[in-house]
Structures are given as C-alpha cells and as structure tokens.
C-alpha cells in the first residue's frame, strides 16, 4: 500500500466535503452562466472521475453506482460517451444533494479498498494522483462558482469570514532579468500536467517585471481616467467586448453614489484600495498595462522571473488560509504564487515535443490549445500543494469569474 497517496486521497476528499458544508442544498443546483457549474455538479463530477477512470478499470465486474451518472456528470470527455450540455448542468434538481454526498461516500469506500490492497500498480497510482489533482482544481471552481451564484442575490450571502482592513499597499519594484537562454517547463519527477512538458530552451530579451500584482487602488486610477471610455487602450476584440457588454469596472464591483463597492465571500463592502486587484479579463489586464505604458509578461518571462525571485513566505494566500479573497502585499515581498491568477500575453499552445497523456485521460489538456490565454501563479482559491511555477492555467480572454489579476512587465531598456 502507498500510504502517502492513500492519505492524500482522503485529505483532499474531506476538504471538498468541508467546503460543501459552507452552502445550503438550495445553493447547490444553481447555474448562473455556461462557465459556472452548479456546486452539486462539482461534487458529483469529481466522484465520477474516480469511478469512471479507476474503479471501472480495477474492480472486477464493476457495477456503476447509477446508470445515468455517466450522462449527468461527464464534463467534456468525448471518449466516455454522451453527456449533458455544459450550459444545462443546472437543469437537474436530481439527484438531491444528500444523494450526491452518499455517492461520494460510496466511491470513497471503493477507492479506499483499492488503496489498501497490496501492491497497487504504477498506473493505478498515477491515475489516482491525477484524480486527486483534478479534485483540487474543482475545489477552486467550487469556491469561484459559488461566489458567482451568490453575487446575483441582493441578500449577498457570505462565508463566516471577518475582513481585516489592510495596511497601506507597498510600492512595487522592478525586478530585472538580463537577456539570455533559459529553460522553462516542468523539471522533476513529481506529478505535473502534460501541458507543462517538455522542458525546453527559450531565448529572452532583457526585461523587468513588477515585484507584485496590481492593486485595486492602481486600477481605480485607470477607471477615473476614463479607461473604459477610451478605445485607444483596448485591443479590437476587447473594445467590442466593453461596448457590447457595457463593461465599466471589474466583475463584482458596483458604484453607489460616489463610492465603489465590491462583493466578496466575506460580504458586500467598500473597495479597499490596498488589496490586490482581481476578477478582471485578459482584455482589461492588457488595456490597463497599455494605459500605464507597460505590457503583460509572456508566460516564459513570468516563469523565469518566478524562478529567480519567487519567495516562500507567510504572505502567501491560498485556499488553505480560508480567506477566499486577495489580501495586500507585505514590504519586500516578491511572492509569485497565490493571491491571483496572473494573465500573461501568451496564447495557450503546446510546448515543443508536447505529447498528450495516453489512454482515456488524453483529452485532459491538449484539445483546449486554441483561442485561450495562459495564466500563472495560482490564487487565493488554489490549494497550496497544487500549484508550482511551471503550472499553466488557461481561459478565454473575456472570462473573469476566477480570481484573475495582472502583473506588469517592460523591456529592460525602457
């Protein structure tokens, strides 16, 4: 028995269940947008993943828990048969929440029986680790999707989190990186996604990158200067998005009289200018950078800088800390992980020599390598042991319901 992965499996599953306890059954079925899944669906889908890709393979004469769950809780795996359309996941009040939780317990028991068996093979361990990492991704989605659902209510539901006023934000510093030949991509023998490989060389011109992400106060200056009313700062598609959707501020912001307010999972309150900016699209990040006279870093610049300057310290803000919102920046901090996912100016494309995983899980990442932008660094809703500097997240440029922010860069001679 591999005790480490056994303990990890139960720890991660228990954390998901504890997150689910923060909501009521009525919260669990709502779907506010195509990109937002009902929380109950996340709880079932992560369970279906273990059942479908592991139990069906390793349990002799396995009988599926429920004949309809393949259809209801498959996400996008074409190889696994027909499934409900993504925008219709909220159409199903059944199974009830308590039935989904019973489903979770039943599959956990089956998985624990396998995990305690003697000498599980290497492929079983690999698939189980993938299932654990997959569930950690959905822990983040569970938080961000529930936030989007609650934000639509005039009652503004919240977790029992006390918001603490932040100290004055520190002024960002420019961190220089001289031109040179660097290696990027995952290096090591631990778990990593197929899209992080292969490690490869890349030449970078000299550049500088900000020591911290942009704050809310900095972005307010962009708004006050008419940033959303001046097309010259925006990419063509970005400006069309602003005009078509009447965008005037980041997601969850609302102007009341002359003051800006924000909805957070600690409640609806006034903007704190000292906290790190979040819930912006790639279009907004790029327009802000252009307004400031700078640019977004490429994903390779970000990774090289994070490797050179990243610092592990107590200012990290992940799911584990339970704040579920970006905080401020400490003096001297150059942390690149946690707080907010940082938009880069890189399209989500395969690295040289990329090969998707074999078998049924080969659909996991590769088929999404089109029309999306890369984000780096993790967020306040990312489990801390899930993130690393080589981790590549990716979203369409208009999306902003995740905890997304921006870190500025410039050429070394500017």
Image (tube, grey):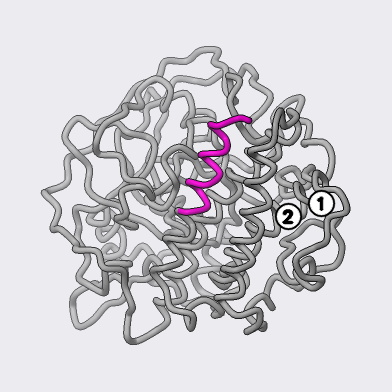
Quadrant showing the C terminus: top left
**Left or right, residue 388 beside residue 262:** right
| Image marks 2 and 1: residues in contact by CB distance under 8 Å | yes
Q: Is residue 3 magenta?
A: yes
Which residue does the image show at 40% across and 33% down from the upper left? 410
**Left or right, residue 26 beside residue 269:** right
Name the element at disc 1. Answer: helix
Q: Which residue is mark 1?
A: 56
Q: Which residue is mark 2?
A: 51
Position of residue 372 measured from the top left corner of the image (x, y, whole percent): 64, 51
Position of residue 235 measured from the top left corner of the image (x, y, whole percent): 54, 56
Tell me the distance, in whole angstroms, between the alpha carbons under discs 2 and 1.
6 Å
Q: Main secondary structure of the magenta part?
A: helix
Residue 229 can be seen, yes or no: no
**Left or right, residue 155 beside residue 367:** left
Position of residue 270 measured from the top left corner of the image (x, y, whole percent): 20, 70
Would you place residue 73 above or below residue 350 in this image?
A: below
Which residue does the image show at 38% across and 69% down from the upper left? 22
Residue neighbourhood size for the residue with mark 2, other residues' Cα within 10 Å, grouped as few (<14), some (14–19), many (≥20): many
Residue neighbourhood size for the residue with mark 1, other residues' Cα within 10 Å, grouped as few (<14), some (14–19), many (≥20): some
Can you tell which quarter of the image residue 65 is in? Answer: bottom right
Can you tell which quarter of the image residue 213 is in? Answer: top left
Position of residue 277 measured from the top left corner of the image (x, y, whole percent): 32, 54
Residue 277 can be seen, yes or no: yes
Q: State which region is magenta.
A: 1-14
Which residue does the image show at 77% across and 44% down from the upper left? 361
Q: Earlier in the sequence, mark 2 or mark 1?
A: 2
The residue sitting at the top extreme is 180
Q: Which mark is residue 260?
A: none
Which residue does the image show at 30% across and 64% down from the upper left? 223
């Amino acid at each position: 028995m591999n005790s480490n992965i056994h303990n990890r499996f139960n720890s991660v599953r228990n954390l998901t269940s504890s997150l689910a306890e923060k909501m009521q059954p009525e919260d669990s079925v709502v779907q506010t947008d195509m990109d937002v899944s009902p929380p109950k669906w996340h709880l079932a889908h992560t369970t279906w993943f273990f059942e479908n890709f592991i139990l069906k393979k390793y349990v002799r004469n396995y009988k599926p828990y429920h004949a309809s769950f393949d259809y209801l809780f498959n996400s996008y795996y074409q190889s696994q048969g027909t499934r409900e359309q993504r925008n219709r996941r909220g159409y199903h009040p059944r199974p009830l929440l308590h039935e989904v939780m019973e489903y979770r317990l039943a599959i956990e028991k089956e998985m624990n029986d396998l995990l305690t068996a003697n000498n599980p093979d290497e492929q079983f361990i690999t698939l189980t680790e993938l299932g654990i990492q997959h569930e950690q991704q959905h822990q983040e989605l569970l938080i961000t999707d529930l936030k989007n659902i609650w934000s639509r209510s005039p009652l503004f539901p919240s977790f029992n989190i006390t918001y603490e006023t932040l100290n004055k934000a520190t002024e960002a510093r420019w961190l220089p990186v001289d031109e040179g030949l660097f290696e990027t991509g995952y290096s090591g023998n631990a778990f990593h996604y197929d899209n992080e490989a292969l490690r490869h060389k890349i030449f970078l011109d000299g550049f500088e990158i900000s020591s911290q992400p942009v704050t809310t106060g900095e972005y307010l200056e962009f708004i006050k200067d008419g940033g959303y009313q001046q097309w010259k700062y925006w990419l063509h598609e970005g400006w069309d998005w602003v005009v078509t959707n009447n965008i005037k501020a980041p997601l969850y912001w609302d102007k009341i009289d002359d003051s800006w307010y924000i909805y957070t999972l600690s409640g609806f309150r006034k903007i704190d200018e000292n906290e790190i900016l979040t819930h912006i699209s790639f279009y907004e990040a790029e327009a802000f950078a252009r307004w400031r006279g700078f640019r977004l870093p490429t994903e390779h610049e970000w990774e090289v800088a994070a490797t050179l300057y990243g610092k592990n310290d107590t200012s990290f803000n992940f799911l584990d800390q339970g704040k579920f919102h970006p905080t401020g920046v400490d003096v001297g901090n150059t942390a690149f992980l946690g707080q907010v996912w940082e938009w880069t100016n890189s399209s989500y494309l395969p690295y040289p020599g990329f090969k998707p995983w074999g078998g049924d899980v080969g659909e996991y990442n590769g088929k999404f390598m089109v029309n999306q932008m890369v984000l780096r660094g993790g967020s306040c809703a990312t489990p801390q042991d899930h993130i690393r500097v080589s981790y590549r997240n990716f979203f369409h440029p208009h999306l902003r319901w995740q905890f997304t922010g921006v870190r500025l860069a410039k050429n070394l001679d500017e």
